[in-house]
Image: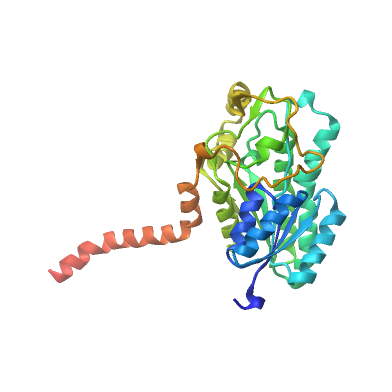
Amino acid sequence: MDESTREVVVVTGASAGVGRAVAREFGRRKARVGLLARGTDGLAAAAREIEEAGGQAMALPVDVSNADQVEQAAASVEAAFGPIDIWVNNAMTSVFSPFWELTAEEFRRVTEVTYLGVVHGTMSAVRRMLERDRGTIVQVGSALAYRSIPLQSAYCGAKHAIVGFTDSLRCELDHRHSRVHLTVVHLPAMNTPQFGWVKSRLPHKAQPVPPIYEPEVAARAIYWAAHHKRRQVDVGLPTVEAIFGNKIVPGLLDRYLGRTGFAAQQTDELRPPDQPYNLWKPLPGDRGAHGTFGDRSRSHSVQTWLNLHRTAMGVTAGLLVAAGLFAPRLRRALG
């Protein structure tokens, strides 16, 4: 592959989970990928995977809550690989806890990483992309950006904030007729390692609310969104149901989740009181892309495939309708 044609991509939260799967998806397309995260072990492993797949990687230990670190990382990527084509904001953290047991410091930390981390990444990307009048920024959102659930008030608030911030920026880009593209990819429950390292006050081990999808489902959608001018991509039928259900019967969902949301986010296994967590600093070791729920996770989403191919499906449906309308006339003409 001609070096000049390789895409330059930045992925935040690239050491594990969805970010790791996204980095691999770009790596197997031979991209040059800047990997931003705090965990050096996971970053090193992600870089090896990309290079083994034929891509190029730069591992950059960064806390996205620090705008200066993000900006320095962006400059390093461009110095090594050239202008950034695609920036994927994915880094996140959370705390599983009733709101009244959260501390202000914990709430602030979740907000700084999950929301302000997206703002900082977008600032560094826009700063470069505006002057070139090209580039794509992908915000990794969630069904929880529209339909909040109990026990994750800080995380849900941050995901809601990402949508509001992105919509505002999109208007500003439109005002100046910029060709910089913004898209948001909203995800359902994913089988990622976060449930084993997120700080928790729950009596039992945390789990994603079923149905659960493998991170590669998200990675394929994010890669697609980075190359198509779609404003928003909703991944998985549960995401669509959550978004539209909250528009129609929000009060009913409040009551339903109040009754079921606590149990749905916990397994039957007791949580060790000394379970390590990564809220303030990364944990050692490489956690990879997958969590421990593989036996209950889906590797494909029919809804997502149909969503990403809806233009082709519409054309096909139109041709079939046209064929049905004109077939009788054709038979009469030939008869």
**Residue 33 lies in quadrant:** bottom right
**Image point (79%, 41%), residue name:** 111
Q: Is residue 311 above or below residue 304?
A: below
**Residue 273 lies in quadrant:** top right
Q: Is residue 169 above or below residue 106?
A: below
User: In the depicted view, which residue is nearer to us: 193 or 155?
Assistant: 193
User: In the depicted view, which residue is nearer to us: 226 or 19?
Assistant: 19
User: In the depicted view, which residue is nearer to us: 66 or 230?
Assistant: 66
In the shown orientation, is residue 68 left or right of residue 213?
A: right
User: In the depicted view, which residue is nearer to us: 308 or 4?
Assistant: 4
Q: Residue furthest left?
A: 335
- Residue 247 visible within the image: yes
What colour scheme has been applied to the protein in the rendered image? rainbow
Q: Is residue 127 above or below residue 65?
A: below
The location of residue 188, given as percent across then percent down, is: 58, 41
The location of residue 21, given as percent across then percent down, is: 61, 52
The location of residue 298, given as percent across then percent down, is: 49, 43
The location of residue 7, given as percent across then percent down, is: 65, 69
**Image point (70%, 41%), residue name:** 160
**Residue 265 lies in quadrant:** top right
How many labels sit on residues?
0
- Residue 13 visible within the image: no
Q: Quadrant of the C terminus?
A: bottom left
Q: Quadrant of the N terminus?
A: bottom right
